[in-house]
Amino acid sequence: MIDKFMLKNAKMMFETVSNSYFKRYDLSKEWSQLSRQIHNFKSTIGREPFMYDLIPNLFLKIECSMKKYVNDVLFQKDNEWFFKIGQYLFYNLSQWIKNFSCNASSALEGQHLTKFMKKWWNKFLDFEKNGKNKAKINSFPRKILLELTNNCNLNCVMCGIGKNGYDPSRDFPLDLLYSLSENVLKNTKLIRLNGLGESTIIPNFLEYLNILSGLSAQLEIVTNLTVVNNKIWDKLLENNTNFLISCDSSSSQLFKSIRRGASFTSFKKNLKYIGTNISNPLQGQIIFTLMECNIPEITKVVDLAAEMGLGGVIINVVKVDSNQNGWMYQQFENIKERFQKAYDLADSFNVVLKLPDHIGNLPINKNISNLSCQLHCNNPWEEIYIRYNGDLTVCNMLNPYIYGNCQNNSFEEIWNGLNAELFRSFVNTKYRHYDCRDCYYLV
């Protein structure tokens, strides 16, 4: 007999999800909403709801015949399907609906939501009917991003991950990395260590490197470069690693006010060490996070890169809510001017400068900027981001959409699975994921 997930108590299922698979995420709003639904349901019906009572809330704006068809398919799914695939399907869709918006009137927005929901569930039904028989995309992504830790030694103003102290449970399991290296990582072209954490602070980081160094893929690391341990930098250099180095100011005072807890002296010493020992200038590049406080530093950081023997500077922009990015528009002319000066300076130093092609919804000169992925994106077919807990997510830009978890399902099943297929279906349409709509991922 099938252990049907739709017949489970909804409250118990949510508690299981929030206390295990989704433990790393803040589900307080979802829990509050579910509690209200359970209370209202119990007041009306006289019992707590089962999953089949609440799942139809995700059938918004689709016709009755499709609702019945989807419901019938879901009723055939067991508990294992729910925990491997379904929980992510429902989470992704609920977040997408909640954040659904477009630059149009509310009436037109409603029409778009109706079309989106119809397309979503049509795609679901099509995958259920034909998915296993369809030709798979490339068996493995060209690029794999690894979040080796969700811990950091700094408490940066734009992130704050390091404010809570070090928690070993937020490190990538070494046995999982070993397993992936045997079955997945050996088949990719590039491995980048980055995420919401600083890889080099893991106490046994060199053990991770020993596993990765046995692979043929090009290794890259995004690092704040503040750890004082040349053994780490030497091992990375020995492996011909590409360094993407976070630096938002050439001024000691401003640097330390942004990257709270950092020593500018140690950082600059490490920067010089990397610049001196890389085999090619482009093996070392600075990632500069643009904020209102450091606009004047753009050209100065280009200067710093050239001085230290680094070959590139990448200007990154932190995405914020539209009501928080007023400074971008107020400072837009200033930013454009600084970009042009930085471009000219970089050209004179033979430093490669990557500038975004937009700030907010305002365009930057195409002659000096790099194309972003906000209107067209190939990344969902070419890369994947593996979080410290095994979650497989979309890309380098920390998109919250989740494909699945490689600790309870195989990588290939997730990479070619329902949740990945749904995301790819929308990414280059007007219904694309809300986190993709102001993307600064540079091609």
Image (cartoon, helix red, strand yellow):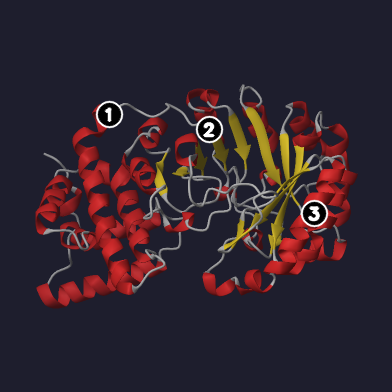
Q: Is residue 368 above or below residue 386?
A: below
Q: Residue at x 31, y 44 (%)?
A: 85
For the residue pair 354 and 279, the one nearer the viewer reads as 354
Marks 2 and 1: CB-CB under 8 Å? no
Q: Is residue 146 above or below residue 155?
A: above
For the residue pair 51 and 291, the one nearer the viewer reads as 291
Mark 1 residue type: Lys
Give the residue number, with chain letter if any, for mark 1. Answer: 134
Mark 3 residue type: Ala
Q: Nearer the viewer's eye, disc 2 or disc 1?
A: 1
Q: Residue at x 30, y 59 (%)?
A: 14
Q: Tag 2 or tag 3, which sits nearer the N-term?
A: 2
For the residue pair 193 and 407, the one nearer the viewer reads as 193
Q: Which element type, helix, strand or loop, lies under badge 2?
A: helix
Across and down, in percent, residue 412 comes to 39, 30
Across and down, in percent, residue 55 comes to 21, 58
Question: Residue 155's quadrant in the figure?
Answer: bottom right
Q: Which element type, helix, strand or loop, lies under badge 3?
A: helix
Question: Residue 39's quadrant in the figure?
Answer: bottom left
Q: Residue at x 56, y 66 (%)?
A: 320
Q: Which element type, helix, strand or loop, lies under badge 1?
A: loop
State the quadrant of the C terminus.
Answer: top right
Mark 2 residue type: Asp
Q: Which of the labelled discs sits on residue 417, or is there none? A: none
Residue 263 visible, this angle = no
Q: Taking 17 as reference, is 268 left or right? A: right
Q: Which of the labelled discs sits on residue 342, or is there none? A: 3
Q: Taking 23 as reference, is 70 left or right? A: left
Give the residue number, with chain letter if any, for mark 2. Answer: 175
- Cα–Cα span, label 3 and label 2: 45 Å
Q: Taking 224 as reference, is 161 left or right? A: left
Q: Nearer the viewer's eye, disc 3 or disc 2?
A: 3
